[in-house]
Image: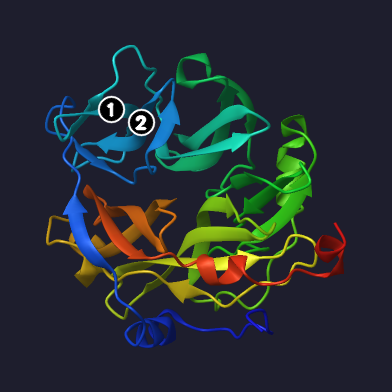
Amino acid sequence: MLFQSPTLKTCQVLVDEFRLAPQPFEPQKLRFAGVGDRDVYNISAPFADDGELVIAGRVESRDSEQSEVYFFVERDGVWIPREGAPVFALQDPFVARIHGQLVFGGVETFPHPVFDGEYCWRTVFYRGPNIRGLKPFAQGPDGMKDIRLVELKDGSIGVFTRPQGEKGGRGKIGFTRIFSLDDLTPDVIEAAPLLDAQFTDEEWGGVNEAHLLANGLVGALGHIACFDEHGNRHYYPMVFVLNPETMERSELELLALRSHFLDGPAKRPDLTNVVFSGGLIRKGDGTAELYAGVGDAEAQKISLIDPFVKYEAQELDRMYASV
């Protein structure tokens, strides 16, 4: 059985296990132009819009965290801003297709309501027939990142959450279901039950993208992170699979380490070992491409064994078996 009682594993245990697994291959840096000397990182995977592939990327100066999200198209091997596309004052963009609509979102920062000079954040959502038609429709609770949506087999919408603080500590993953995008409210998001046994209290993680698998399971692409004894951050791309009917889930598995990617800069010394999952393109031949932000300073992609193939062959519970 691929679904058994998951065990709580630290980043270090997952790294040790991953070193014995098939390793990713063919890393490649993505080239961006048209944004001056600013960095482009924490990108989405390419997605189709009006007949061409587009990447959403976080654009930011190396010495700042005031970012914008641009939509890029590829021209002669270089990704450039798409002419006429909107630019959003957001961080860490993501996209999904829900009920025939494009859903786009990112993290919005705003002045902290209590502490002068500090900032708070929330996830905001837009929807529309295409990029040019995006309109705001929802926002998450203040202080919550990594809210992701996926249309489920029965037409309902799965919602991954990541509360922090009293409920989630440094950041734990929750999951709930809604039946319409109009039901996506801060209260619904806040109330989502947590998935157990994923992160220790000293570590944290979240979902960056969700995939509906052929058998109705949900493949979650995300990250797990920790501090070391020197205060440096370590982010690892990971996956797990969730049965949205029973809430059973698989073990966390890492996809790559920073050493598998090409050498490059980091925004700060404490971010050298950061790989932030952006999106996964499943190739249909048993392999996949992971798109990621590296070092909070650049974007790369890398090829690997499709982590969800082995789960698509698995039988679901009686509810799905009887359909």
Q: Residue furthest top?
A: 84
Asked if the residues shown at circle 1 and circle 2 are in contact, with their CB atoms under 8 angstroms apart, the answer is yes
Circle 1 residue: 73
Q: Could you tell me the amino acid type at mark 1?
A: Val
Q: Residue furthest front?
A: 285
Identify the residue shown where x is 20% and y is 62%: 26
- In the rendering, which numbered label is found on residue 54? 2
Residue 272's place in the image compared with 298, above or below, is below
Count of numbered marks: 2
- Give x and y (percent) for residue 162: 59, 56
Please tell me whether mark 2 sits on a helix, a strand or a loop: strand
Going by the image, does 126 lie left or right of 274? Answer: right
92 or 26: nearer the viewer: 26
- Give x and y (percent) for residue 51: 41, 23
Identify the residue shown where x is 38% and y is 44%: 45
Going by the image, does 307 lie left or right of 27? Answer: right
Q: Quadrant of residue 43?
A: top left
Identify the residue shown where x is 16% and y is 24%: 34
Q: Residues within 10 Å of mark 1 (few under 14, many from 20)?
A: some
Along the polypeptide, which appears first: circle 1 or circle 2? 2
Residue 213 in view here: yes
Please tell me whether mark 1 sits on a helix, a strand or a loop: strand
Q: Could you tell me the amino acid type at mark 2?
A: Val
Q: Residues within 10 Å of mark 2 (few under 14, many from 20)?
A: many
Give the distance between the C-alpha atoms of the residues marked 1 and 2, in whole angstroms.
Answer: 5 Å
- Give x and y (percent) for residue 290: 35, 56
